[in-house]
Image (cartoon, rainbow, N blue to C red):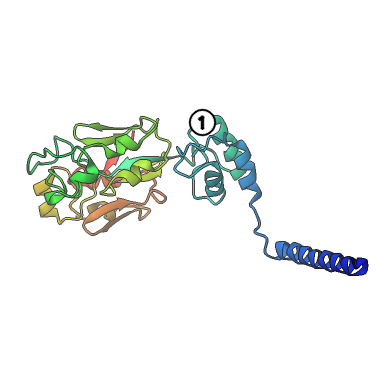
């Protein structure tokens, strides 16, 4: 055996390994992705259940979203108020001021909405939406009341009452699963501290709305005229309140001829 040859080979391999190691070390420094320190601190506070109740794949996903401002500091339903308060301190905000809740944009319950026909198919919103007219109710934009959103909620925060889905604001953790479950995109997340909302989703003209529902928005724009913060806008015959701009004065509610603008109590 050529000892010198073996030694040279070992030294060559060692040198190559050393060079590669140095290059990898340099590359890791150059291309390193900086981690938000707040994200790491938030992750330490989260319970680690990875249950998905927050609407994210796991605690890592929620921590990243909170640090980026894409999720509420009280987004973890398992951690509760204590964890929310601690995360709020890291993010420099209070858990209450950052709290979001689900809101159903429909007032077409059994008393207000008209029915076109009797539906006898599967009691699922996901399936009923494909039948004639988008469901048995005259308003094709409204809640069908079959409860696909209820099935998705793990926190007993949403129920079908008198034909439409209603959110229990105190139980809602804003996980967003009901939002994803609604085939008509009727549910959105709004700040818990919101004062006024417009529970309607119709894009029909006023005359057609009145044929479908007693209280639907007719897009008259009266609610927009006296708003001191320009928070109310009408688009596609439907009024919407920008909750970030709303001052809670209630002028829009007083102006609405359909009484579709509601105060959250």
Q: Position of residue 131 (x, y in %)?
A: 14, 48
Residue 91, image quadrant: top right
- Along the line of sight, which residue is nearer the eye, 96 or 70? 70
Please, which residue is most extreme toward the right here?
4
Q: Is residue 87 visible?
A: yes
Please, which residue is most extreme toward the front here?
1
Please, which residue is most extreme toward the left here?
117
Q: Position of residue 93 (x, y in %)?
A: 56, 42
**Label 1 sits on residue:** 80
- Quarter containing the N terminus: bottom right
Whether residue 253 sits left or right of residue 41 in the image: it is: left
Q: Is residue 195 visible?
A: no
Q: Secondary structure at mark 1?
A: helix
Q: Position of residue 50 (x, y in %)?
A: 52, 38
- Along the line of sight, which residue is nearer the eye, 20 or 138? 20
Residue 148, image quadrant: top left
Q: Count the marks: how many? A: 1
Whether residue 62 sits left or right of residue 241 in the image: it is: right
- Quarter containing the C terminus: top left
Q: Position of residue 197 (x, y in %)?
A: 31, 44
The residue at 57%/37% (across/down) is 46
- Along the line of sight, which residue is nearer the eye, 17 or 74? 17
Mark 1, other Cα within 10 Å: few <14 / some 14–19 / many ≥20: few
- Along the line of sight, which residue is nearer the eye, 24 or 6? 6
In the image, is residue 131 above or below residue 235?
A: above
């Amino acid at each position: 055996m050529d000892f010198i040859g073996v030694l040279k080979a070992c030294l060559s391999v060692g040198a190559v390994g050393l060079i590669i190691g140095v290059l990898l070390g340099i590359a890791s420094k150059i291309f390193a992705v900086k981690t938000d320190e707040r994200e790491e601190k938030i992750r330490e506070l989260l319970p680690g259940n990875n249950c998905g109740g927050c609407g994210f794949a796991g605690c890592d996903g929620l921590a990243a979203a909170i640090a980026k401002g894409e999720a509420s500091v009280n987004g973890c339903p398992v951690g509760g108020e204590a964890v929310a308060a601690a995360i709020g301190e890291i993010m420099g905000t209070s858990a209450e001021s950052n709290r979001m809740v689900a809101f159903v944009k429909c007032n077409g319950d059994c008393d207000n909405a008209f029915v076109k026909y009797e539906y006898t198919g599967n009691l699922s919103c996901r399936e009923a939406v494909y039948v004639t007219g988008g469901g048995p109710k005259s308003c094709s934009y409204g809640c069908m009341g079959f409860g696909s959103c209820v099935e998705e909620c793990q926190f007993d925060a949403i129920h079908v009452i008198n034909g439409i889905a209603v959110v229990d604001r105190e139980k809602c953790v804003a996980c967003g699963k009901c939002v994803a479950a609604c085939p008509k995109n009727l549910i959105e997340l709004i700040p818990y501290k919101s004062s006024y909302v417009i529970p309607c989703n119709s894009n029909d003209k006023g005359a057609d709305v009145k044929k479908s529902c007693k209280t639907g928005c007719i897009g008259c724009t009266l609610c927009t005229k006296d708003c001191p913060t320009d928070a109310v806008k009408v688009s596609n015959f439907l009024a919407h309140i920008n909750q970030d701009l709303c001052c809670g004065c209630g002028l829009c509610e007083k102006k609405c001829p359909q009484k579709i603008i509601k105060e959250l109590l």
